[in-house]
Structure formats: structure tokens, C-alpha cells
Amino acid sequence: MAHDQRPSVTVERLRYRARLIAQMRDYFEAGGACEVTTPVLSRFATSEPALESLALECASVPGRRYLRTSPESAMKRLLAAGSGDIYQIGPVFRGGEAGRFHLPEFTMLEWYRRGFDHRQLMDDVEALLHSLGMNRPITRVSYAELWARHIGGDPHTITTARLADIANGKSTRLSPEDREDRSLLFDCIYVHRLEPALAVDGAVFLFDYPLELRGYARVSARGPRIAERFELIVDGTEIANGYHEITDVEEQRQCFEQDNALRMRRGRPKMDVDEDWLAALADGLPACAGVALGIERLIMVLTGVSDIADATGIGVLSDSVPELKSDGSME
Amino acid sequence: MASYSTSQFKAGLKLLFDGDPYSIVENEFVKPGKGQAFNRIKIRNLKTGRVIEKTLKSGETVEAADVVDTELQYLYHDGLHWHFMDPQSFEQIMASEAAMGEAVKWLKGEEICEITLWNDVPLTVTPPNFVVLEITETDPGVRGDTASGGTKPATLETGAVVKVPLFVEQGECLKIDTRTGEYVSRAKAG
């Protein structure tokens, strides 16, 4: 039987996607940001504990290369070199992610604004969405407020034992090690309790995360356990993730080291620290905030498409997702 | 024992949880931004029919349940067990009252049933969607009354009691939908 390769995307949807991306460019050009294109291949894999870089080996090229999980490192090198405000639209890759809202390859819009903090960047995200025709009101809620409302107490000071009890309240299997892994416990509670609550809240900026969920966001001046991170969540689905960026090289190195410590505790491979990123910070990254927005997810929200595959530029996906071996390479 | 990783999860897959066999009804990949990935699954307990939800960290493995669906012919009831036969191999197998469930109401012999085996033991028995059974006892028919819409109880040859229209008579055969337990029509002897 002939293999069916026909794209399921309609011409109408292709045009919609193209127009949306053109409008994004209009927004950034009008605001003085410069479009950049940075390499998809990197010498460094991500060290983020819950992300997997896809690894590539080629006989004629010495050394392993990785497909980027985000353009963050390269864009920070440009910022440190004096690029000014920049944005990029391009593919990113994440191993092992496949579902109604996840693809191993998707399109990311990422941008950086010098002198902004995460709150100003939320305003910017809102203005962008407005320019794209999304007129739904976006409410703002801090992680602590959301937690107090749906779980009770303060997520910034909660004990690990209490976290484990809340996470265990539902049908999740937690090992003794899991019960000590605070960021895993926060993730578990998010999936069970906060995400369903957010799913009926419309469009929300969730901001000021617990330190365990800082990613690479700065620690807030308002509290040593508050990270200046935000997400835009629409109907329960994350659309964008932003940071008031870390500019201190030692703080960034510590984050990478903590990533690797967590990876090893979770039985995942340790990754070489991205020395290019650190060198850029040593050279001097201007104070800035940056955000990454998933274009297919945004299309889902704007058009009501229910499967992310239908928001891609082709619509047909192969059935099999590469299985990741424990060293991060593909089978 | 075989096991499945969360990346192999899909509807219909049979898994073992806390010693009971389950079938996946729904599988969803969920992942908070930058966070741990989970598979949120709805699973049906194949013994009780109850559907529950579980969340597993993506990458975990779960033991497979040795559950297969097969078609077997009903032979007889020995007072304790119900006996079935594989029409190809002539191999015989016994089902318990728990596995039979509602099926006992509709079987008289020779019907081909769908049987779910767990570790080669019948877990559930599903009778054919339609069976034809004779009425062994019912009140006399009201001749010509095909329009009033009234019903009366009728006992069938298997002992099952169904609601039937007033006009049907003792000794007649009826077509019954076993999924609803309802009378469908009069029928020739099956």
C-alpha cells in the first residue's frame, strides 16, 4: 500500500500561519527589535533537568552536536556583544515530548528587551498578542496567590514533607527519592491541582515562581525564595515562558550545576556546562528580560485547533517519536 | 514479566496495577513548563469495570497484564462452573460466576461468546449481542393488541425475566438484546 504523505494542513491554515508570523515581525520591527537567526546545531546540550536535547553524530564531523532546545544561549551571546533588542523565530527540538500539546519539534518565538524586568515583559507580551488580534483580557496572578487560593499556605516557605503529602494526595506513585525532590513535587502538584484550576481561568500571567522553579530567572529583591519568572497560560496551557534574566556569571554557573545535580539524582546523564553562555555573561550581558513563546500553541489558542500537529506547517506527523536512550542519543 | 514504558502507552493497552488488570482508556502526556513530564491515564479495572485516573512520571515502566480477548463456544453449566470450548483447538476452559456476570441470563448452549482471559482464566464473558430464547412462562396474550404499548413480564428458558408486549404467548421465541436486556422482536426458534 502506498505510504500516505499528504499534508493534512489546509491552504487556509498555511496562510493563517504565515500571516501570523508576518504580523509578529511587524510588531518587533515597529518596536525597534532586530530579527536574528542563530544556529540550530550546538556543541552543548541543555542541562535543564526536565529537557532532553536530541544528539547528532556524523562520521565526517568530529564530536557530537545537539539540536537546540531553545535559542537562549546564542541570543545571549549576541546581547552581550551589543546587539540591542533582538527576536528570533525558528525551530527548537525536545526529545521524548509527544502529545496533544507537545511535539519533538516546534516553532519558537523568542525575544529579549534590554532594561526590562519580567513585569514589563508581561506588558510587552500582552501588547504583541493584542497586535495579533487576541483581545481576551489577561489576568495576572502570582504563584503565591494561586497557591493560597487552591492549596493553601505559602509555596515559598513550605516544608518538603508537606509538599510530598500534597503531591501524594492524588494517584501518583512517588518513590522515597521523589518525596525529597522539591521541584518534582511542585511539578506534580501543578499537574494535579493548579493546571486544572488555571484551565477555567482563561488567559493568565502566572508570575513570581518558587525558587525551585526558577529556571534561569533572577531571584527577586522582594524575597530570596521568589524567582522573577512568568508564564502565559491560556485555558491551562503554557503559551510563553519568560525570565528577568540572570546576568551574574557565578549565579548562572550555580544554576547549571544545580541542574546537573538534579539530573544525577534523577538518574539522568550529566551534561557539559554551556561555556559559551557563561563566557557571554562574563563579557557582560546587559540587564534584560527574555521570553519564549510556542507558535503552534498560540495558533491552537487563536484558532481552537485541538491537536498541536494541526497547527504545524504541514500537519502530518510520523507515528514514531525517537526513543531516547539514557545517554540522550536516539535509538 | 513483560512491561511497558509510558512512551508505549495507548488506549487498549493492558496493565497491572496493585495486582489487578486494567485497560488504558485514555492516555495524555502532560508537562508543566520546564518541568517533569507525566502521563496522565484513565484506566478501567477489568474485574470491576471501574475507571480510575493515575499519573505516572514519563519514563516509568508498568508491568503488563497478560490479558487476551478470545471467542469461545458455551457448552454447559455444571452447577458450579460454566464450561466453554475453543472451536478450533477443542480446548475447554471454565468460567466462574464472577466472570459470567450478566451473561448467565442469556446462555443456553452453543453460543459463541467473547471471553477476556487474564493469565488464561476467564475474567469477563460477553454473550452475543442478540440471542433467541423461548418463553417458558407468561400471562396469556391479549390477541390483536399490538398497539396499546403495555408490557408484561415473561420468563425465558434460561430463567431470565424480560418485559414483553402483551400480545406474545408462552412457547414463542423472542429476540433479546443482551446489552440492554430488552425484547427486540418475536423470532423463529433459534
Image (cartoon, rainbow, N blue to C red):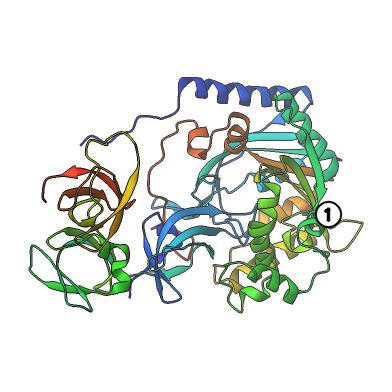
The N terminus of chain A - image quarter: top left
Q: Looking at the picture, how far across and down is residue A165, in whole percent?
A: 69, 73
The residue identified by callout 1 is A145
**Quadrant housing residue A4:** top left
Query: In this orientation, which residue lies closer to the viewer: B182 or B16?
Result: B182
Q: Would you say residue A54 is visible in this rendering?
A: no
**Quadrant housing residue A27:** top right
Mark 1, secondary structure of its residue: helix
Q: Would you say residue A254 is visible in this rendering?
A: yes
Whether residue A200 is situated above or below residue A315 in the rendered picture? below
Q: Looking at the picture, how far across and down is residue B101, in whole percent?
A: 32, 66
Kind of residue sitting beneath label 1: Glu
Horizontally, is B159 left or right of A257 in the view? Answer: left
How many discs appear?
1
| Image point (75%, 39%), residue name | A112
The C terminus of chain A - image quarter: bottom left
| Image point (37%, 46%), residue name | A319
